[in-house]
Image (cartoon, helix red, strand yellow):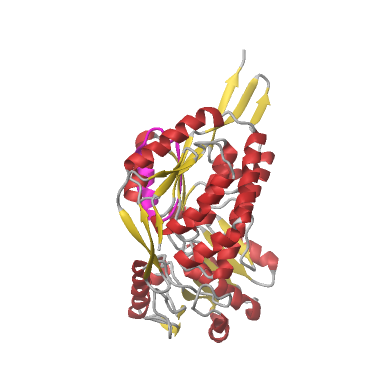
Amino acid sequence: MKTITTHYIDGAFVESHGREVMDIIRPTDGQVIGRVTLADEEDTRRAIAAANRAFATYGRSTKEERAKILRRLHAAVAAHIDDLTDAMVEEYGGPVMFARLMMEAAANVFLSAEKALQELPLTRSWNKTTVTLEPAGVAGLITPWNANSFFLSAKLASAVAAGCTAVIKPSELSALQTRAWLACLDEAKVPKGVGNLVIGRGDVVGAEIVRNPDVAKISFTGSVAVGKSIMRDGAATMKRVTLELGGKSPNILLDDADLSKAIPTTLAIAFMNSGQACVAGTRLLAPKSRLDEVKRAIKEAIRAFPAGDPSDPTTAVGPMVTQKQYDRVQSYIRKGIEEGAELLVGGEGHPEGLAGYFVKPTVFVNVKNDMTIAREEIFGPVLCVIAYDDDEDAIRIANDTGFGLHAYVNGTDVRRARRVASQLLVGRVAINGLLDDQQAPFGGFKNSGIGREFGTYGIEAFLEPRAILEA
């Protein structure tokens, strides 16, 4: 049994002022494996005050000073990838191969931020006018439970690169992963007060961060509903906000696609992180002319995507994070059946031989784009196959959604795939694969959020321009 009673404030682990204790439950079997003492408003205010004091100095730091901190953070996270991976597998149930990739990305994001910082001009001049990009101030970084250490690293990297100090609120469901990550932050010898972290509930810690006038910027990843409340409540103190919210990403399978490659890739994109991913391609748009082929290919390929023990490298789909999330996914599977979608594979209940919070990898076909399972983010291993007539019809269906975070296009004619991709109303489109570039902007259109993260775009989100004009 692991017990966590401290937060990280002003460069030290300090005992929690808050007294609420929450069980840490392992999702593979529902067993309690630890307890965490949650922060209250007083803990949060202490963290904000430490960040505010530190900003007086750190806000005037140079590029090279910031770069040195980023390099130390990279080295610390890289040295603890095994520990971070183990924590994600145990506490969250992330499949180990995916978890390791995410932890490697968590280390690399600091070097990516350093590269972007070096490429970003912080001063621009013309005639007798000088414009400098100034750090916004104390940043509140609020992260979700589905890739905890990666989001902590990514948000902190941009804030540190910009010269901001931070108060971080990870999900209370990620306490063990957070503690493993905090060991890296402490080892990196980040200046006192630059990185502060309190583990607590959104309606307590998150609410204090959002309403506190000493916090200038909020960077949040999570649900649409919470994102809207942050934008509304933060307006009282003119908070700058970056919101990365939900997705219902379309994956367009063009009629010239090689199904032997495209379908396994499609399932990997749909079921990544056990389907608990905002960028999961959960709407497969398939040409009507090849729908029967697509169905056969899915039935064949899905054998390579078993649910099971997340510590087993052959497992593709782990458990849902909580009983609540398991129940949510089950309700959507029932809704799909009730609305008349055809169940191709999977369905209700647990996979054979598994208890805990495991869901059967599920594929619906003959889905209409107005069905609930095609409109709402399920956040589980559920793929909807929607038939289309031609490229224009596929683009129309892809854009007929309240979301706009990510999309995928598969086809052998890359020029045609690019033409289709250029008409999709999303923040990112990947052609023929599950692709990433930490220098490319990440964020969404419509209900998928406001602002962008990563690269120079992510650093600029923490900066404000100041112009000085001379006579």
Of residues 340 and 356, the one drawn nearer to the viewer in this rendering:
356
Q: Position of residue 242 (x, y in %)?
A: 48, 45
Q: Position of residue 313 (x, y in %)?
A: 58, 75
Q: Which image quarter: residue 328?
A: bottom left
Q: Residue at x 55, y 31 (%)?
A: 58
State whether residue 343 is above or below residue 74: below
Q: Which image quarter: residue 262?
A: bottom right
Name the residue furthest top.
471
Image quadrant occupied by the N terminus: bottom left
Residue 93 within the segment the image draws in magenta: no
Residue 59 visible in image: no
State whether residue 429 is above or below residue 243: below
Specify start and end residues of the magenta stretch as a single range: 210-235
Q: Position of residue 67 (x, y in %)?
A: 65, 40
Q: Residue at x 54, y 55 (%)?
A: 150
Q: Position of residue 185 (x, y in %)?
A: 55, 47
160 lies left or right of 20: right
Name the residue furthest front.
1
Of residues 299 and 339, the one drawn nearer to the viewer in this rendering:
299
237 lies left or right of 383: left
Of residues 468 and 354, the one drawn nearer to the viewer in this rendering:
354
Residue 155 visible in image: yes
Residue 225 within the segment the image draws in magenta: yes
Q: Residue at x 36, y 75 (%)?
A: 330
